[in-house]
Amino acid sequence: LLLLLLLSLPCLCLAQTQACAGTGDLQTLNYPSVRTGVSSFSALQGYCANVGYGTGVKDLTSCFDEAFAKKPPFHYDLSQVGGCTEEGDCNTCTGCIRPLKLHVQSLAISRLSYDSRARRILVEVSSQVYWSDTRLFGTLVSDISAVWKPSMRVTMVLVNDTARPKDLSEEKTVSLEADSTRQEYAAPVWTQNKDGETFSFRVKSSKVTCLATNMGSGAGCNMQDDTKCGVTQRLKQTTTFPIRGAHYERFPFDTHRFRMEIQFSDPYKAIPNSEYPRWSLEPPILVDFREGSPPPEGDLWTNPDGTIQEVHASFKKSLERLSVAGFKDSFLVKKSADDGGKFVITVSIARMPDKFAIRYALPIFLMTLVTTCATWMNSNALLHPRNFVCILSLLTGVTLANGSSSSTPGVSSQLTWYNAFFILSMITSFIGLCQNFAIVIIKTLNTKEGPQIADGIDRVWRLSWPLLYLSLLFLTTLVLLSDWHQAGSAIFGLVFIFAVFVWAAYLARKEMRAHAEWRAKKEQEAKEEEMKEKEPLVTKSAPSEIVVTEKVPQHTPVYAGHTR
């Protein structure tokens, strides 16, 4: 009974309109019925009969749901409607159907995130869209879930996402398919404040309304104006796109670019209609983004390349407030007339490596440098502290690697700069530990020359190993991060490494000469010492010399008076 009452309301309201208006004061706005579709609810029964429904309450309810909730409220050009009878039933519609016009009163990108670990892009768009629907006239519908409504369509493509974008001769794109979409019919929309001058975002719900019109001052009768029946949809749509085809070789210095399109479309794909081919419209919906409206509704957005794009003030405000966490971002906005009108936003993001470098990369780098410089400690007195530094460096690297796993991209097939840096640092620290063990072995096996050889190895190591570590790190950075040609970068880096090896060979040769001189000196000293030790032994074993001395007669002086 309620449904039948609702169906009879248009006739009652029309009769009331004719009764309240004086002669010649009012032209009725009751659209004529079009037999091939629904133009107003006064033609609902005729439409249901044409599409095969009965006249019972159950059939009418089913027809009501299909006609009202699943068919868009087409706009009719009455000048193209023909074959109309006196009762207002028309059977000719040659080009009388016009696309539905949507008026965007607020559009904002509320949230945008790029999660390289989970490999997904999340975008949240809020909008307020209004469209008129004359079929609401005479009904008590107020729930937006009971009416036809367009869907917001957000698409995403990666642009030039390669290890070396500058090597591309043409644009390369990878389309991303949305894996989840959540819609809420309450959203933050651009609303004028009470002062009448400023605007701000406020959360509001969708509504279905028909405005009331005073039909005559003398009659004092009010009724709904069927031309101003419409729907205000406040929609917050959250869409998630899984990332595929992205490159993270430059992590944590990687940059990415993706392009998203925001448009409104018919979710039920009612047009083109195979059952009524003459209804086919392309596009079925025309979107008025009101970007060309005067301030404060319209505004201008300055793109990174210096171009100016007219946008709605709400859209500009949302872009100014928008930030992609962990990245430096920029937004290039273009308006396209394709598909009834849409906005194309190209987002360029560059990861901010400061936090990651300070928390993870820098400690590993400093600990590795300490390991390479640990050979300045005396190997005789401070060998154990040297081993401790190497072991501490390895443990620190492993701990920081585990801690950074939640921040690194979840792509195991790609070797990132950070991966190469970590592996290189760990190998450097491990070889430093092996060098300490080698010194211990040399001193143990060669007690005479071992200490001298160990000191020589330390001198070569301390002057070449840090340079080799830095050269390998330079080569890795040059190949993975620079925009130079990859082969040229590798050759340039290998030249530095070759120079370090030449330097190390020079130091080793110098130490070998010094060791040879030291050995020769030691051998000479050993011979001299041996001669010194042998000389007293020869003296003792030689026969004693017999010194023969002649007795020289003593001449006694003779004095006078004395006789011998």
Image (cartoon, helix red, strand yellow):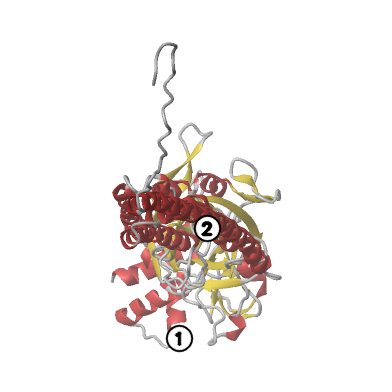
Residue 484's tag is none
The amino acid sitting under disc 2 is Met
Question: Is residue 109 in view from this perspective?
Answer: no
Task: Indicate the position of residue 540 as horizontal and vertical percent values.
Answer: 33, 50
Q: Is residue 160 left or right of residue 226?
A: right
Which residue: 47% across, 43% down? 191
Mark 2 secondary-structure assignment = helix
Instruction: Report helix, strand or loop for mark 1.
Output: loop
- What percent of the width, then of the height, locates residue 490? 62, 66
Tell me which residue sits at (55%, 70%) in the image. Answer: 74
Name the mark on residue 51. 1
CA distance separating discs 1 and 2: 102 Å
Quadrant containing the N terminus is bottom left
* Mark 1: amino acid: Val
Residue at the top extreme?
561
Q: Position of residue 82 (x, y in %)?
A: 64, 78
